[in-house]
Amino acid sequence: MRIASVSLLSAFVRLPSLIRASAPVKLPASAPLKSYCATLSPRLLHSQSAAMSLPERKPFSADFFFRQLFDTESSTYSYLLADTSSGEAVIIDPVLEQAKRDAQLVKDLGFKLKYAINTHMHADHITGSGWLRQLTGCQSVIAAASGAKADRHIAEGDRIDFGRHSIDTLATPGHTNGCMSYVIKEQGCVFTGDTLLIRGCGRTDFQEGSPKSLYENVHAKIFSLPENYRIYPAHDYKGQLESSVWEEKRYNPRLTKTLDQFIEIMENLNLPYPKKIDASLPANRECGVYDIPKE
């Protein structure tokens, strides 16, 4: 035991000299350091470079209220936005079954709902615009091209004001012929409806849909926005809340393809007939006013 202890002690004593005596690792001058790093961990390097190039997000202004709401049956996102100084508010893509919830939230927060806005005439749920109009006195808004009734019809270039804040409107048909996207430049965000989803897009096989039109509008009008703009869609089915222009331009599996490839993908999705389309479309043409549940 004494011999083993002495040997171990002597090994520790010699350790610094052994380290100093070790030959340093030399890299060939002809081989760049980057090639060695790439062989070590390509996935790590990719994630690090992506994080380094991810654009800085623009923070919301102090007087801008934002609340994302969700309907579990249709996986629809609604968005309550408000000017906290004036109390004027709007809601984007409300759902009929959640209208009382949304009206109560507006009341609880001390806001006055000015507009209930739809990005398009939905086929998977009935809009809550009609019931919210009855509950709060707000006005309904939708694109004139949608063919649906509303208090206010809009086209590209029209502005929707609430308090000191304003929404710029973009016509982005393709999913339907009446699709609109809503941009709030000061806050660095865009509400894309079903035109652009997180890593996806709306189907184009009904309601005058056109894959060519959708592709061209996304690339010309949404992907041309600053890359740090947040993207808020009307739906998500995988639990994601938001994306960005930067992300979708790089990682959207459909819209990163060429136009011809995109058209081929969309024409071969073979999706089932929407479950609620026969009830939703007639109701939404009338702004949902004839489908208000009786108290």
Image (tube, rainbow, N blue to C red):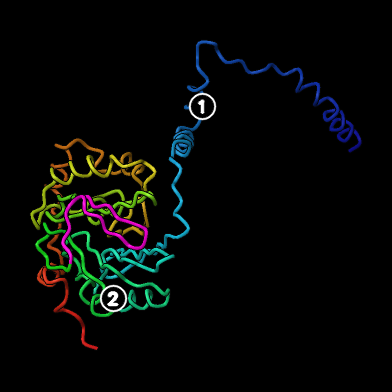
In the rendered structure, are the residues bearing label 1 and label 2 in contact, judged by CB atoms less than 8 Å apart?
Answer: no
- Neighbour class for label 1 at 10 Å: few (<14), some, many (≥20)? few
Q: Is residue 194 left or right of residue 209?
A: right
Say if 147 sits above or below 100 in the image.
Answer: above
Amino acid at circle 1: Cys
Marks 1 and 2: which is nearer the front? 2
Number of numbered markers: 2
Split into 4 quadrants, where in the image is the N terminus? Answer: top right
For the point 28% across and 76% down, which residue is it?
99
Q: CA distance from mark 1 to mark 2?
A: 55 Å
162 inside magenta stretch: yes
State the image quarter where residue 132 is shown. Answer: bottom left
Magenta span of residues: 152-170
Going from the N terminus, do you reach mark 1 or mark 2 first?
Answer: 1
Residue 56 in view in this figure: yes
Split into 4 quadrants, where in the image is the C terminus? Answer: bottom left
Q: Where does label 1 land, which residue?
A: 37
Element under label 1? helix
Q: Position of residue 35 (x, y in %)?
A: 48, 22
Q: Position of residue 122 (x, y in %)?
A: 18, 64
78 inside magenta stretch: no
Q: Where does label 2 land, which residue?
A: 99
